[in-house]
Amino acid sequence: MSQSLKSFVHTLLNTLLAASLLGWMGINPVLASEIAKAPTILLASAETGRFLALPSLASPDSLISKALQDIRSSRLDDALKEVNRAIALRPDFKLAHLIRGDLLMARARPLAGLGAVAKAPNNSLDDLRDEARVRLMRYIDQPGPEALPRQILQLAPKQKFALLADTSRARLYLFENVDGEPRLKADFYMTIGKNGTDKRKEGDKRTPMGVYRIVQQLPRAGLADLYGDGAFPLDYPNEWDQVQKRGGHGIWLHGVPSNTYSRPPRSSDGCVVVANPDLKELSRWITVGSTPVIITDRTDWVTREEWQQSRDELLSQLHAWASDWESRNPDQFMRHYNDAITAGGNSAWALSKRRNILNKNWIRLSLSDFSLFLYPGGEMAYTEFTQNYSSDTLSSLSRKRIYWRMEEGKWRIALENSQAAPTSGNLAQR
């Protein structure tokens, strides 16, 4: 059989099997077929070399996903063994119990749908079907081995690890910083707000979207059981959220109650929630104050070439901004800012900045320790870096944060803030 024919057969089998299983989960047949035909879908049983790292090869999460794959391949006895192992590890795993009931009934009649139980509450079954769907999709909707997340374009040296919350896949990805590039280390099933994403106000039970930092670690002692084995508060609302007048507070990454394991993808009050064993694992890699958490609707997995192009475009714009500042050409410099900041060059900030530039005989800038991230949708970016500024009247060292928006095909600054960095004593203001 030719390689092209093998590829066609592989794709056909993948489409039929994935559509069949998703249909059993209660997903609309048309939608199931479209999901199955998506180019990122892989036939998990034939692509085991492309599996992502697992927190534990015998975790309840991996066992139930293996059982779903066995069901897809009509290996129902093997599926029942995996489910029983998952229940033995976590007796409170509701989804595992539901699948076990289906498998036992399948000995008398064909599987018609997930949770085909008389008088069962529809809303509870819908929640469990959603959970089954996203847990399975973690195994059959995989990025290629060389794919990189476009949302993380550069990590500063102090950012040893980064977290990327993919709300549509219900996965929390852990990336290691390897020479500034994000390398996927592990991923975890997660829960977000009951009403989805795009948080706007207090009590809307939505999870915010954007780039955040972990600012604190709260141990289990002193916390309500709701938060499980601990919590990591995020800096929501950040500077950009405040400018956009987004309200609310108390968005945390935390665990689950002691009697909980199985839960729907949308069941929190807005926080990002993972199982307690997963939170303990994540705690090993999180550094308070430096670990970034990017929350997006869907991870944009791209080739290395596409990733490098996105990174280089943003870096090029950043260096052009610094170069135009050094040139002491205020008109050229102001073109890097959007009209909301400059008001056509007539805002108080723009006029003050223009005078400041023209009053200098020389300006030199050195930028280092870059962090580069894209917001959901790719039309906004966040950059953070160390800025060493010197002129004939002033020297300073700061950590600068810039929020960029894509306008007419160019990145323009929408918000800029800085904080003085500790000096080594050789920089003096005068």
Image (tube, rainbow, N blue to C red):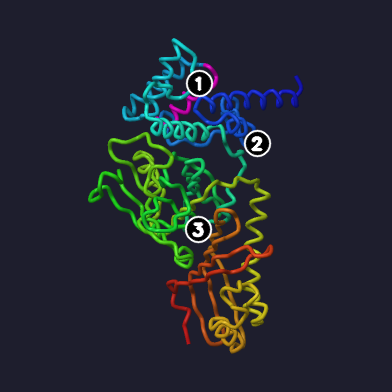
Q: CA distance from mark 3 to mark 1?
A: 43 Å
- Residue 39's label in the rendered image is 2
Marks 1/2: CA–CA distance: 22 Å
Q: Earlier in the sequence, mark 2 or mark 3?
A: 2
What residue is drawn where x is 40% and y is 61%? Answer: 247
The three-letter code of the residue at mark 3 reads: Pro
Along the polypeptide, which appears first: circle 3 or circle 1? 1
Q: Residue at x 35, y 35 (%)?
A: 261
Mark toward the viewer: 3 or 1? 1
Q: Which residue type does callout 2 highlight?
A: Pro
Amino acid type at mark 1: Asp
Image: magenta residue range: 60-74
Residue 403's spot in the image, x, y percent?
Answer: 54, 65
> Disc 2 versus disc 3: distance between alpha carbons?
34 Å
74 lies above or below 267:
above
Residue 70, disc: 1
Q: Main secondary structure of the magenta part?
A: helix
**Mark 2 against mark 3, which lies toward the viewer?**
2
> How many neighbours does mark 2 have within 10 angstroms: few (below 14), some (14-19), or many (20 or more)?
few
Determine crowd level at label 3: few under 14, some 14-19, many 20+ residues with C-alpha closer than 10 A: some
Query: Which image quadrant for residue 93?
Result: top left
Across and down, in percent, residue 2 comes to 76, 22
Residue at (30%, 53%) from the top-left corner? 218
**Is residue 96 covered in magenta?**
no
Residue 117 vertical placement versus 380 (above, below): above
Q: Secondary structure at mark 3?
A: loop
102 vs 225, nearest the viewer: 102
Position above or below: 177 against 259:
below
Position of 388 with respect to 332 (left or right) is left
